[in-house]
Image (cartoon, rainbow, N blue to C red):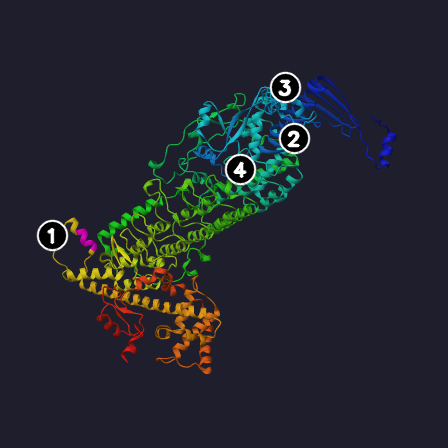
Amino acid sequence: MGSFNKLTALIDVFTTKDKCWPYVQYYIGDKDKHQRSGFGENHWSGAISLECYIGRFVQNTMHGMGEYKWQHQGPNDIFASYEGYFYANTMHGYGTMSYADGRVFSGLYYNNMRWGPGIESHINLQENVGLWRGSQLIRLAWRPQAPSITLDLTSAANGKDFVESYRTMLLPKPSTVDEINSAVDLLKDSGCDPLLASKIWHKLYPKNCTNVKSAACNIQLFERNYYTEGCYSLEELHEWNDEITDAEPNLEIHYAWNNSKTILHIMKHCYRHENQRSTYNINIAGILSGQRFLFKSPGIHELNCRTLLMASYLGYLSKVAQLIMESNVHPDVADCQGNSTIMYATAGEQVEIILFLVEVGADINCYNDSCCTPLGLALMKLLCVQNDIPISTIVQSLLPPTSTQQSCTDKIENVSEWNIVRETPALSPGRPFTRSPSKVKAPNTKKLKSSISLKDAPKRKQELLFEKEINSDTNSFESFSDSERLYTSINSEFIMKIDDLFQQTTANNILFYLFEVHDMVKEVIENDEDHKKATEKNPKKALSKEYKVKTKLSKELFPQIVEDSSSITSADKAKKETLDRIKLTILQLCDNGADPCLVNCPQPSLVMAILASCPEIISELVSRGADINMNYSNFRNYTALDLAISLPFTFVNLETIRTILKAGGKANHLLQSMEYPEYDNNGPTLLHVVLSKTTESDTEEEIRGHIIALLLEHDCDPTIQFKGRSPMDIALSKSLDIFDIFVKSPKTNLNTVINNSNQNVLVKLFVANFCNTLSLTDRLQILTNLMQRGANPLLECYNGSEKYQNLFVFANKIMENFESQPKQHDTKPKKADKPKKEDKLASKSLGKLTSDEVEDYKQALQLVKEYARYLHITWIQIKLVKELSDIVQRYKHRHWSMIIKEHKNWKQMKLWVTTRRCLEIWNVLRSSQKFVNGKNILKNLLCIVEFYNVTPFGKSLTKITAELKDSVEKQVKGILREQELSKAMSDSTLSYVAFELKEDADQCFKVCFECAMPFQVERIECSCCKLVLFCCENCVKVNEECINYHPCIAILKK
């Protein structure tokens, strides 16, 4: 060891070489194989400090109970000492640290840092009390003396039971610290002799390895010598299993103090070292339960922590920055209810404070003791402000009258809190819920066990001192320090602002549960029963509204969104400003990393955003990871879209539904109901629900139509039946305007079965008992729309179990029944005897029509025949275009004037297809994968058809001259240019060609060209084009009298 004198010190000033002053140490005590092991004392002396340790040693390390003192040479002659537990040369466990300035800290350590409950005492009789993380408090034993601004859910009568279902549960498990040597077992398993293994096992570990994080360290040796009396550790219980209590009936399971990771780790650390706490008399229950009156007046550090919480709510950014950056206050410090600085900033809608706190390291996803995150708190406020719920009754509105969720305490009898008292205050008198008392369950009066010792339980007399502690921090204002003055002013302003806030009232004086969701399956069933009763009484009044042409949605249809500024009151302006601030706060939280998936209490994040009807917030939550298609078990297993559909018809809710569908919400699922388990696999669709709702105004009916259009656009099947009826069938009976939305949807199959009678739409329109409920004008308009959108009357159809080759076979049978019945007059006949039940059902399916109604029936059928003939013509034209396009494709290297020679059926093409018609068919057929597409092919095809059209009809084609060729190509270029300049052709205009692309489309056109009836025996072919057939001479004559039906007629007449 070198010597120290003034000369050496002067030399050090003028030299740059670093000096190394080694320590001189000596040990007095027990040893084990030349290693310090057992009780002893070790002294270190050096040029800078003198240190001494007296206590337990293990493998040359301070391990166990001991006392460490050190004194540093310097201007202040710093002296400090620690008396407590060590673990492998680190302060670990309960201990007491004394400082040179008179401070004394007693509490729990972890790896040389304060980690858990502790009390820091000062010489001025002040104490900093709470949970510590290093030199900073992270949880106080205090909360502001004002109503909770962070929405304490446990303050309600049933709030404690409700919140417990979201708490993390911890299962105590014994830690093995017996004389078990894993090294010996490893040698035995490897084939070593047991006697030899007991002698050489220590060679597996390095002699001087004391790093407990290393795999080469003998951890069992340290554990065995530290936990001499054994210990229990806590493990998180993620999923409950009855086998846990069956194995150990007396095992007590504890709720976590808080769901945050830091507090969970601290609780586990405290539980593991509970045997050491009795020596240091640390009142954990008083610290965690917020019983600050049990301790001395708060110190400067605790006052700064309190000030930071309240300043974060009030928005004093400079004060918050000063406290964190200069006063060593942790940015995640929380009150005794777990509400951190971000919680207070969120409650005050302080966006700048939130941004700063996140930048300095605050946890954006922290929990409070009510299992709420800052994002969850902001969403709760948004929902309540949107529904005009005053802040004094927010908690009661967020919780059900009785907890509808099954708490874990219903399953586990031995569940309890550990070293914390969560008192449930009596419910303040207020307005009752607007629910029937018969539907409210009895509250859970089950008492939970508590493992708090008697010495930690507060006395009742001491509770009377709680009110006095408010002003007992200091004696006079003159004696205040700067921190105390700041705390006093901030505290006064905070309390006044909270009091004013809780005195505010709203126009809504009714207290109701915000998360009440109706059973939509039940509503559909009730509506179906009501409709059946109304139809049986008067079938002609089944349709609710007259048919009218719908217009597109414009801004004029949004009276609820576009408001006159003069009609907005000051209260509405204040509400709008509050909502804007809360939304901005939510967006700021999401931008800073708030996870919406962690929001579960009181309800998931998306549920609260949907019930608050905020589309922009829903989009933000989904973009941050919220599952838009999650099934919520608390809400009848509904999805986000189901919840939005269950809300009343408003334009804001319409935008909410549109946002959910745009975000990927699935609309093609069936609803379930606990009350109707028989419909679990065949429940109603969302279209059934929308159609079953009652509307009270034209605006709501307009919104209903747009919701149906959105659902159809996003693949909600309109043909799925519930109780024998599909949404299309319901819409046809409910409102023709709504039915028109189904017809105009390009994803609606108009040729499928829509009810349990196996009827499609066309068949139902021609059933007698439904046909007479429509006026002729409405019926013709519906049939026109159906035919234009793809309904095919030539397909096979059913009515009950009877099968028909097409619609006209079914309609002709109905007409035969009409003709066989005696004619009825419009005058009312005399009352006859009541028919029997069997005769009544038979006549009901047949229907009874007057002579005028029969004529209307024939007129509607004639309209469908005309459209069927038009489909027949289209089918012929498509066959001709396909044939010619294949020839053009085969000889695409030739000029169109040369390709004509390869086309044999030029007369048929000339008779049936025009140039513009050919272009229309091309635009439809090019969507087919089997159809060859190409600009050059299209040009040649149109030129050939145009040449046929300008050539006079004869036995042979006109010779193609240069002038004629240029004229044809010029005409085709003009047609193509018109198509490019015009708007894209609507799919609805060409939807009648869609079914022609199917392979079995030819089968349905094997019918008479005039009457559309299937052939029996006789078939008459057109002698000119040989493309159409007639069933009899009468049909040929009728067809000849019609104009623009058969292009061959004019030629045959010549």
Q: Which comes sooner in the sequence, label 3 or label 1?
A: 3
Q: Which comes sooner in the sequence, label 4 or label 1?
A: 4
Residue 871 percent across, percent down from the top left: 33, 66
Do tag 3 and tag 1 residues touch (Cβ < 8 Å)?
no
Q: Which comes sooner in the sequence, label 4 or label 2?
A: 2
Residue 387, can we see it?
no
Report the magenta residues as a range.
840-845
Mark 2 lies on residue:
214
Q: Residue at x 48, y 29 (%)?
A: 423
- Quarter of the C terminus within the rendering: bottom left
Report how far apart the C-alphas of labels 3 and 1 lie in the structure: 109 Å
Numbered disc 3: secondary structure: helix
Q: Residue at x 66, y 37 (%)?
A: 327
Question: Can you tell which mark lies on residue 198?
Answer: 3
Mark 4 lies on residue:
367
Mark 1 lies on residue:
833
